[in-house]
Amino acid sequence: MANATLSINDREYSFPVLVGTESEVGIDIGMLRKSTGAITLDPGYGNTGSCTSAITFIDGEKGILRYRGYPIEELAAKASFVEVMYLLVYGVLPTKEQLADFGYRLTQHTLLHEDMKKFYEGFPPSAQPMSVLSTMVASLSTYYSNTEEDTDLNIVRLLAKLKTIAAFSYKKSIGQPFIYPRNDLEFVEDFLHMMFAVPSEPYEVPSAIHEALDMLLILHADHEQNCSTSTVRMVGSSGADLYSAISSGVSALSGPLHGGANMAVIQMLEAIRLDGANYAKYVAKAKDKKDPFRLMGFGHRVYKNFDPRARLIKQACDRVLMQLNRTDPLLDIAKELEQVALKDDYFISRGLYPNLDFYSGIVYRAMGLPTSMFTVLFALGRLPGWIAHWKEMRDTGGRLHRPRQLYTGELIRAYAPAD
Ligand code: SDX
C-alpha cells in the first residue's frame, strides 16, 4: 500500500503504511518526531495502535471476535476454558496429548505456599476481592524466581493458582475455612468446589453451573489491547516479571469503566428495581450531560454495533436460569432496559449497545456467585489473554512503553522564597 503523506508548515513528510492480515491499515509514525519534530496526540489511544499482535482480532463494526483465528461463537460452543487457555498462550489448539499434559501440569501447581495463607489474615473481611487478588498475585513473585528458563513454569503456576487465590479470598470474606484444590476435578469444577464446598459435607458442582462458568470464562479470555491488557504490556515492557505485570492488569481491570462494570450493572439494576423499574428515568439520566450517571454495561470503545459476547451471555442467562429452575427480576429489568435504550436515538446514534458486562452479572447471580466476586471472575477469565500478550511482547522484543505528551503548564519562572 502507498505511503501516507503528512503536510506540516508547507513541508510534506511520507510515512510507511502497514496492512494487517484482516486488511486493517496502520500508519507507521515511528520516525514522526525525528523527521518533523511533532508528535501525535490521542487521549485514550482510541486511534493509536501500540503494537502488532497475532493473538485476537476484533471487528467492532461487524461484531467479530476471534482468538488466534477461531470465532468466539465456535470456541464458546465447542471448546473448554483449559483448551482456550492453551490456544491463547501457545498459539494453537492442543492435541489430546498436549491437553492431557497441560491439564496435569495445572493440577500440580494449584496449591499456594502455606505461608501465603497468612497474608489473608491481614486483610479485613470487607477487603475488596480485586485488591486481594492484585496483592496476592504480586506476592507470588516473592516466592518464585523469574529467570528466563522459569517463564513457562511461572505461566503454568499462575494459570493454576489464580483460581485458588480467588476462592480463598471469597472464603476469607465469608469467614469460612479455605477449601483446598482437588486434582480429581476438572479445572473450572475445582474452582467452584473451592468456592462452595464446606468441610462438613460433600459438595458436588451442578453441571449447569460448571458448563456456564466454563463458557463465561472463555468469553472473557482475551480482547486485544483493552485497558488492562495494555497495562500488562506497559508494565511488562520495563522487564518487570510476569506476576508484577499481571497484578497491574488486575488493578486496571477493577475500575467500573472496565471490568468493574459487571458489578456496577447489578447495582444499577437493583436501583432501578427499587425505583419502581422506572426505565425512562434512568435512560434520561444516562443521556443528561449534567448527570454523571451512565448506563453501566452499555457502550464500548471498539464495538459500535453489538458485542458478540453479550449475545452469547444473554442466551446463557435464559438457559442457566431455566436449568436451575430459578428466576431473577433483574434479568427482566435488564431486557426491558435494553429494549428502551435501543429504541432511543441517543444510544443508536452513538453506537451504544450492551457489552459483555451487561448480562454477565445476572448469570453469575444465577450460579449463586456473590456480586463482590464478579470482577474477580472476569480476571480469572482474562488471565490467559493477559499472559499471552505479556509473552508475545517479550517474544517479539517489545520496546519500553514510554508515550510523549504535549506540555501545557507554566513557562520558565525563577524560584522566589515565600515572603
Ligand atoms: C469492558 O476495551 C475492551 O475491550 C473492554 C472490554 C474487555 O473485554 O476488555 O470489552 C471489557 O471494559 C467493557 C466496557 C465496560 N464498561 C461499562 O459498561 C461502563 C459504561 N460504558 C461507558 O463508560 C463507555 O461506553 C466506555 C467507557 C465503555 C467506552 O467509552 P468511550 O469509548 O471512551 O466512549 P465515550 O465515553 O467517548 O462515549 C461516546 C459518547 C459520549 O457522549 P457524547 O460526548 O458523544 O455526547 O457516548 C456516551 C458518552 O457520554 N456514552 C454513554 C455511555 N457510554 C458512552 N452515555 C450513557 N451511558 C453509557 N454507558
Image (tube, rainbow, N blue to C red):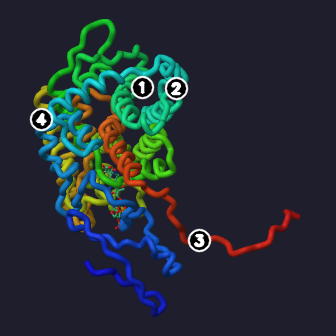
Amino acid bearing label 4: Arg
Residue 169 circle label: 1
Q: Could you give the CA–CA distance between mark 2 and mark 4, rounded to whole angstroms?
A: 37 Å
Can you say which quadrant of the picture contains the N terminus? bottom left
Mark 1 and mark 2 residues within 8 Å of each other at the beta carbon: yes
381 relative to 278, above or below: above
Q: Which of pointers 2 and 4 lies earlier in the amino acid sequence? A: 2
Amino acid bearing label 2: Phe
Q: Could you give the CA–CA distance between mark 1 and mark 3, rounded to whole angstroms?
A: 43 Å
Query: Mark 4 = which residue?
Result: 319
| Residue 195 point in image, percent of width and height | 32, 22
For disc 3, does the CB lie below 8 Å from ligand 1? Answer: no
| Residue 366 point in image, percent of width and height | 22, 31
404 relative to 112, above or below: below
Residue lying at the far top of the rendered structure: 200
Query: Mark 3 = which residue?
Result: 407
Which quarter is ligand 1 in?
Answer: bottom left
Q: Is residue 349 left or right of residue 74?
A: right
Q: Could you give the CA–CA distance between mark 2 and mark 3, rounded to whole angstroms?
A: 41 Å
The residue sitting at 35% across, 73% down in the picture is: 27
Q: Could you give the CA–CA distance between mark 1 and mark 4, rounded to whole angstroms?
A: 29 Å
Amino acid bearing label 3: Tyr
Can you say which quadrant of the picture contains the C terminus? bottom right
Q: Could you give the CA–CA distance between mark 1 and mark 2, rounded to whole angstroms?
A: 9 Å
